């Protein structure tokens, strides 16, 4: 019974959506933050889980995760993002964002060469990919 209630709580938490800008200031990196040399464009969706955890993934990774909950570790698919400079707008600060849960954003930037290992205030350790972006725009729905 407790396992079932835990699963329902996890599922409810994972399905929640938060439009708040993800906080990255409390993350303490414990590894090298060297960037890969190639600048790429990547399409990502925010999967608001109401927790200090990696919450961005490609649309196909979000779909894969939803079909395999709870068998897939979140940090194997989801990533954290960070703007290269304070003047760069985060996705939720874009003027044309209409705050819908399935919006996809196009980012231009670079991945860290190594995964980012960090510990949340409540002691959870994450080891996920980290993307540093120079620009971001919403992808118009067709």
Image (tube, grey):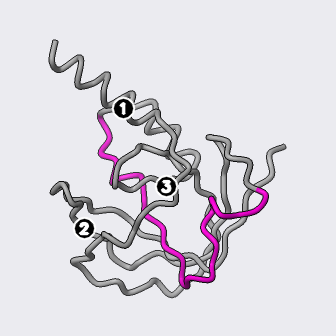
Near-viewer residue (97 or 76) = 97
Q: Is residue 54 magenta?
A: no
Label 1: element kind: loop
The numbered mark, 1 or 2, whose residue comes first in the sequence reads 1
| Range shown magenta | 71-96
Q: At which x and y percent is residue 11?
A: 37, 28
Q: Earlier in the sequence, mark 3 or mark 1?
A: 3
Quadrant location of the C terminus in the rendered image: top right
Image point 33% across, 76% down: which residue?
114
Q: Position of residue 140 (x, y in %)?
A: 80, 52
Does 137 sit above or below residue 30? Answer: above
Gap between marks 1 and 2 measured at Cα: 23 Å
- Mark linked to residue 56: 3
- Pointer 2: what residue? 118
Q: Is residue 93 magenta?
A: yes
| Residue 134 percent coordinates (x, y) | 62, 80
Circle 1 residue: 69
Q: Residue at x 48, y 45 (%)?
A: 48
Mark 1 or 2, which is nearer the eye? Answer: 2
Disc 2 to disc 3, C-alpha distance: 16 Å
Foreground pick, 11 / 116:
11
SS type, badge 2: strand
User: Above or below — where is 108 with respect to 122?
Assistant: below
């Amino acid at each position: 019974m407790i396992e079932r209630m835990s699963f329902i709580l996890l599922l409810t938490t994972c399905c929640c959506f938060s439009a708040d800008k993800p906080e990255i200031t409390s993350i303490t990196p414990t590894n090298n933050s060297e960037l890969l040399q190639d600048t790429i464009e990547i399409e990502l969706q925010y999967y608001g889980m109401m927790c200090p955890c990696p919450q961005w993934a490609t649309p196909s990774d979000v779909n894969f995760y939803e079909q395999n909950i709870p068998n897939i570790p979140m940090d194997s698919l989801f990533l954290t993002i960070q703007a290269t400079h304070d003047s760069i707008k985060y996705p939720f600060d874009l003027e044309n964002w209409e705050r819908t849960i399935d919006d996809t954003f196009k980012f231009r930037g670079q991945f860290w060469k190594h995964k980012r290992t960090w510990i949340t205030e409540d002691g959870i350790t994450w080891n996920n990919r980290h993307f540093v972006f120079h620009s971001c725009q919403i992808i118009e729905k067709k």
